[in-house]
Amino acid sequence: MNIYLSLVLQFLLISSSVLILFKFRKTLGLAPLYLFLGAIQYLQSLIGSRVSITDIDNIIIYPGSVIVFSSILFAVLLIYIKEGARSARTLILGMIISNFLLLALYSFSYDPALTTQAKSDLESPSFFVLNYKYFSIGKVLLLLDFIWMVIIYQFLISKVKKWPIYIVLFVSLSVVLIFDSILFNLIFNYGANDFNALLLGQIFGKSISALILSFVLYAYLKFIDSDSYNATFIANQDRDVFSILQYKKRYLDLKTEKHQSEKKLTTQLETSLNNISDGFIALDSNWCYTYVNKKAAGLLGKSKEDLIGNHIWTVFPEGKEQSFYKVYNEAFETQKTIYFEDYSEPLDKWFENRIYPSEEGLTIYFTDITEIKKADADNQMLRSLIETSDEFIGLATLEGKPLYLNTNGRKLVGLNTDLETVDSIIDFFPAVYKDRIINEHLPHVFKHNRWSGEVHLQNFETGDLIPIEKSGLLIRDPETNTPIALGIVAKDITERKEAEEQLKNSELLFRRLSANAPVAIFQSDKDGKCNYVNEEWLKYSGQTYDEALGYGWSNAIHPEDKNMVLEQWQKSIVSNERLLQDFRLLHKNGDVRWISAKAVGVFDSNKEVTSYIGILNDITDRKTVEAQILKSEKYLENIINNIADPVFVKDEQSHILLVNDAFCKLLNISKKDILGKTLAENVSLIEQEEFLKIDKQVIATGIANVNEETMTFNNNESRIISTKKTRFVDSGGAIFLIGVIRDITERKKAEIELENYKNNLEKLVETRTAELEKEKVKAQSADLMKSAFLATMSHELRTPMNSIIGFTGILIKELAGPLNEEQKRQLSMVKNSGEHLLSLINDILDISRIEAGKLKVTYYPFDYLTSLEKTIEFLQPQASAKGLILRTEIAEMDITLVSDERRVEQIFLNLLSNAIKFSNTGTIRVKVEVVDDFVITQVIDEGIGVQKKDLVRLFMPFVQLEVGLNRNHEGTGLGLAICKNLIEKLGGTLQVSSELGVGSNFTFRLPIKHSDKIID
């Protein structure tokens, strides 16, 4: 087992050493490999038959010889495959030389005394004694094996291309090794007794070696040296089968080929030089022309024959006075290449010159740049324009190498060095953009000639990112339309981006604030597509958030209003005007809501509309009131048209706003010819001033005026009229003049007739006056007696009633002893009746004082809302007992009123008690607001309501709308009469609006301050 392990290790040591030395051939060179292979081959010559193995069939194998010899052929094949025939020949020659050097070294150092007697003709007498016959023939066989193996390999790889490379390697090695075994044994062992055993042993051993080494060589080429594996394999296919033997022939062929190539190249070079667009001349060291191409001859205005062989300054003597003479001499003396531009006055041309000196003379390329120079002025102006531009402007080659960048561009990216330090335009962009620039932007530019969009540049100094709006351009030759360069024009949009970010943040803040706003808010893009609605909108429409986006919001518009709203919305978008419109929304549950919509545009820094923001207010209540007002206006129009006297209404400028039919009939003019006019347009200014004098006086002072005058009409009939003019101020502060005209012609005639009877009636009048005076005294006396009686009776009745109420309360509290439920119930009835009777007595006393004009009020400041709150708290149990809700809506949180607090609370109590009494379900609302130094209070119930015909009877004392014994509500009918008189006493007014079955609204106004106040 040890001998086989030793053989495996020997295989691995030699093959790995060969591969390692070959792998590092670029560092160490091939010499170490040559020496190593020569040494092991020399060793194989020495120990070839020292160690042998005999198997059961008496087959003799010399493993050392087999391994070493096979490894040498393995190395030669590797060198040939990877380095070519020349290196393989060098390897063979190196091995032979190294063998002979070792042989010479051995010969000088050999001592016969150290050897022993030889045992046979084929063996050396000692381990270090060389068999020269074996050595010499072995070298010849080795050389033949090398040649034979390379020829077989090249034949297989070139002619039989379908074989796998491993099979090619194995066949090449195995055939040569078997051939060597047969030839070697025929030479050295033929006729010996063990010839067959030796022959079979070598064939078997070398076949195994070929199998193993072919595998090792294949693995190395395929996996270790894989980068050049395919290229080597293809290159080997193109070699000649006998390339290993054709070195000299190949050298001669190459020499001939080189000469032909040089001749051909010279012809091609001359042809090329004659066809280039530049002038090309060559001067020898004596300043004589040696070559002139066609372009140079044309530019110099001479033929080639006139120039070649002649001295340059003889042909162009004037050149010695120009810069050309100096520069040419400088280039020749310094042997440095010089580029320069100059003007040739004799030729009237500008030339760009490139001078390449050598020891033999000068080679000069020159180009006519006259046209370029003429265009320089224009180009300089264009360059100045580009340099002063605020934008980033640059040029680059088609490969992306920067050529030019204007001043602002350099400043923008912090580039303080030359453009040569920048390898590519990609370096101007941050790393994350580079793949996008390479794979998207540049291909798009080459395909479509342009790419535009927003990207970022990166500052070379700070590394900051700079947002830009970029246009990448493909610049083409105007004549050939061939791409010649890349251009970029970019604009710094940092300020715009910051503004957009601020806008974005403000929009976020806007959405947060608007989310809980009490009005509906929406936002749309510039085309009207909705991109945001708040919660209030969703409540108005019943839509979900997603349903409202886009144009989905329009589905919430009432079908009858939808076309009108959308048409107005589109007009607003086109004209950039704000939208102000009222329309209806139809909720999913069927509710209809009137909406007042207002939308305005949002503009960017360029004053371009970017979006719209709109607010929607619920004006359903207002629309309801307007409908009622419109209805009331129709009623009013019917009323005034049924008034027999002419009626008119004017504004502050005395323009007529309203007239009734009687007015038109009086003047015999239609309404359309009257409205908007003053009826003084056709008279002089002096007459106009006199005509309108009374109007201005009434409007200015507020004092009513009654004026009588005679008017002559179209039929020349004269009539005497009386005109009463009064001022009216509405809740909004607008001033109007209301006038009523009465025809008093007949009355005046009667007065004239009565004047005739005046003297006769004076006595009768005096008599009747005396009688009336007596009746007046009697009436006053009766009134005083009534008032005294009421005051006395009220006192006499209130005293026992207070006692009854007080003692009844004590009994109910069981202070005098326990009571059963029936007793409590009956005593409660007594107490309630007593309180009702006492309230009646108080009302009677108040109304009597009011009628007698003896009701006194005291003015002092107090908290109006606190008084209201105390009254509501007092009446809350009564409201709760009937299932009613008392709710306040206060517009001002601090109201100090200068008035009589007790009388104000009495007003609250009467109005709220009245609302509770006549309401069975719903809510009683109390609204308070301050308008023009008046506090306005509304008590609104959802009770039984009052018919309009009965409204005038509400404030009459002792009058109730329900009569008879079957009345549903108690009362004396004094409460509202007392309220009205108290409010007027305090300087205010009381108004009522009601609808039967819907409810009533009592509104009273009280001045916040009073001129006759008494401050306690």
Image (cartoon, rainbow, N blue to C red):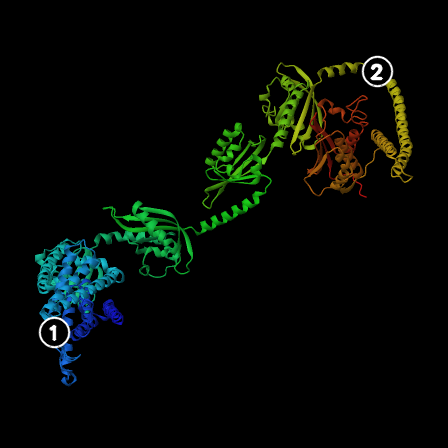
The disc at residue 878 is: none
Between residue 895 and residue 15, name the one nearer to us: 15
In the image, taking residue 510 as reference, residue 863 lies left or right, namely right
Can the viewer see residue 666 in this picture?
yes
Assess whether mark 2 and mark 1 are in contact (beta carbons under 8 angstroms).
Answer: no
Q: Quadrant of residue 747?
A: top right
Earlier sequence position, callout 1 versus callout 2:
1
Label 1: how many Cα within 10 Å (few below 14, some 14–19, many 20+): some
The percent position of residue 640, horizontal first and vertical second, equals: 66, 21
Between residue 945 and residue 980, name the one nearer to us: 945
The percent position of residue 401, horizontal first and vertical second, equals: 30, 56
In the image, taking residue 101 as reference, residue 541 lies left or right, namely right
How far apart marks 1 and 2 lie (CA) works out to: 191 Å
Q: What residue did someone put label 2 on?
A: 761
Name the element at disc 1.
Answer: helix
Q: Is residue 501 above or below residue 822?
A: below
Tell me what residue is drawn at x 81 percent, y 37 percent.
Answer: 857
Q: Is residue 39 above or below residue 448?
A: below
**Figure label count:** 2
Q: Look at discs 1 and 2 and give the one toward the viewer.
A: 1
Give the amino acid at mark 2.
Leu
The percent position of residue 47, horizontal first and vertical second, equals: 18, 75
Give the amino acid at mark 1.
Tyr
Q: Is residue 578 above or below residue 29?
A: above
Name the element at disc 2.
Answer: helix
Can the viewer see residue 314 in this picture?
no
Q: What residue did someone put label 1 on?
A: 134
Between residue 427 and residue 199, name the one nearer to us: 199
Between residue 231 and residue 1004, name the one nearer to us: 231
In the image, taking residue 945 as reference, residue 432 lies left or right, namely left
Quadrant containing the C terminus is top right
The percent position of residue 622, horizontal first and vertical second, equals: 62, 32
